[in-house]
């Protein structure tokens, strides 16, 4: 790849990053004002925010574990999360409110609210979240090229949306029922249902990712199918919740775990199976597209086994124990460079742009190997 092309690409990425940062900051301020108003004051807002954010590191770790072989750029992962928590949240709230007023005017407060929650809300919210995934697939094609990427980005967009939505619900619960109401809703919405938006938008992401990977008719059918699955599951959950509340009143909260088992758990299991199959497929990509490096002596059989297996985490912890953060980082970059080379070759084999040139990646691998040897970690990679 010519130097001028690489410089132009980096400049375009930097411009995109700065533009997104500005948009997220501006819309985020509007969302902040909405949240303070909807929760009824600063204290409910702060309590709701702290409790909503509390399990986020755990949820992010679970989501990123899906894509542990070919890591995505950190700024894109953050962009996915912040799209969900700012832009998707703002437009979702705006259009939900407008349609609520419209349907309440036409059908009265009760049925207007039920239709908005059960039908309109899922369409509006999944559309606001799904736009980010389509935009990423078009704007950063080299970083969004398979089903695994779609699952990760979709889940992060959904997580961002869900975290901010939970701030609103928890703040209202504290305002209405004090610490008791806040505690009950925390365990139900944040702990039990904390990944429900990730499940729904993960369906859209999986569809977009599959389209990027396969092309052909799937390019059009898969994103539509994924989006419709997201809307259906979201609407099924909302409608069931509304119907349950209409049938049994406040006691409906006690039956939320049952709804989780009937409606959300199957979605979790399906996406979990998809994630497992994708991870196994990625290990095969690593093995098959790096095998020639073993024959040429650039890679040992043990290194290929580790980079295409599930032992990398243990080796990384050993590197940290022996040489601290510098050892961990050097080994992490070594494994990442090998994975990037394998997936660049995989894309080229499919007739798609490979991204970074192979010569550049192989030079980086040699440079990182020299760094590991200088740190005294060459034994850790080979044995």
Image (cartoon, rainbow, N blue to C red):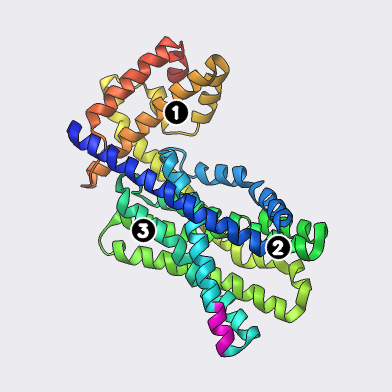
Mark in the foreground, 2 or 1: 2
Q: What is the magenta range? A: 100-106
Q: Give residue 138's position: percent from left, percent from top.
A: 30, 54
Q: Nearer the viewer, residue 358 or 102?
A: 102
Residue under label 3, please give it.
134
- Pick whichever of labels 3 and 2 is earlier in the sequence: 2
Residue depicted at x 27% and y 22%? 363
Residue depicted at x 50% and y 50%? 81
Residue 363 left/right relative to 147: left
For the residue labelled by badge 1, is the local secondary structure a helix, a strand or a loop?
A: helix
* Badge number at residue 254: none
Q: Quadrant of the N terminus?
A: top left
* Badge number at residue 40: 2
Q: CA distance from mark 3 to mark 2?
A: 35 Å
Q: Give residue 235's position: percent from left, percent from top.
A: 55, 72
Q: CA distance from mark 2 to mark 1?
A: 53 Å
Residue under label 1, please give it.
306
């Amino acid at each position: 790849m010519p130097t001028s092309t690489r410089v132009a690409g980096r400049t375009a990425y930097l411009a995109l990053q700065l533009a997104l940062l500005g948009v997220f900051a501006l819309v985020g301020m509007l969302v902040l004002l909405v949240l303070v108003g909807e929760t009824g004051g600063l204290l409910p807002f702060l309590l709701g925010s702290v409790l909503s954010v509390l399990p986020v590191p755990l949820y992010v770790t679970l989501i990123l574990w899906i894509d542990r072989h070919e890591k995505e750029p950190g700024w894109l992962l953050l962009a996915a999360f912040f799209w969900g928590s700012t832009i998707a949240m703002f437009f979702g709230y705006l259009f939900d409110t407008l349609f609520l007023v419209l349907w309440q005017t036409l059908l009265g407060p009760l049925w207007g609210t039920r239709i908005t929650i059960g039908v309109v809300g899922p369409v509006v919210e999944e559309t606001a979240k799904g736009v980010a995934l389509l935009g990423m697939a078009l704007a950063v094609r080299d970083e969004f090229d398979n089903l695994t990427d779609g699952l990760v980005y979709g889940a992060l967009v959904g997580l961002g949306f869900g975290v901010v939505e939970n701030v609103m619900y928890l703040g209202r619960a504290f305002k209405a029922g004090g610490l008791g109401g806040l505690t009950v809703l925390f365990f139900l919405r944040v702990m039990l249902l904390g990944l429900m938006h990730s499940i729904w938008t993960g369906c859209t992401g999986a569809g977009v990712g599959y389209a990027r990977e396969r092309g052909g008719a799937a390019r059009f059918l898969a994103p539509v199918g994924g989006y419709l699955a997201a809307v259906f599951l979201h609407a099924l959950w909302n409608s069931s919740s509304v119907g349950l509340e209409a049938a049994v009143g406040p006691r409906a909260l006690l039956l939320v775990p049952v709804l989780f088992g009937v409606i959300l758990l199957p979605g979790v299991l399906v996406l979990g199976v998809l994630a497992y199959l994708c991870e196994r497929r990625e290990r095969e990509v690593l093995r098959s597209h790096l095998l020639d490096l073993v024959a040429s002596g650039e890679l040992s059989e043990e290194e290929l086994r580790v980079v295409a297996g599930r032992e990398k985490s243990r080796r990384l912890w050993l590197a940290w124990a022996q040489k601290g953060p510098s050892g961990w980082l050097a080994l992490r970059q070594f494994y990442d460079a090998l994975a990037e080379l394998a997936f660049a070759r995989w894309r080229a084999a499919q007739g798609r742009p490979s991204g970074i040139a192979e010569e550049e990646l192989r030079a980086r691998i040699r440079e990182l190997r020299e760094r590991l040897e200088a740190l005294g970690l060459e034994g850790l990679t080979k044995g």
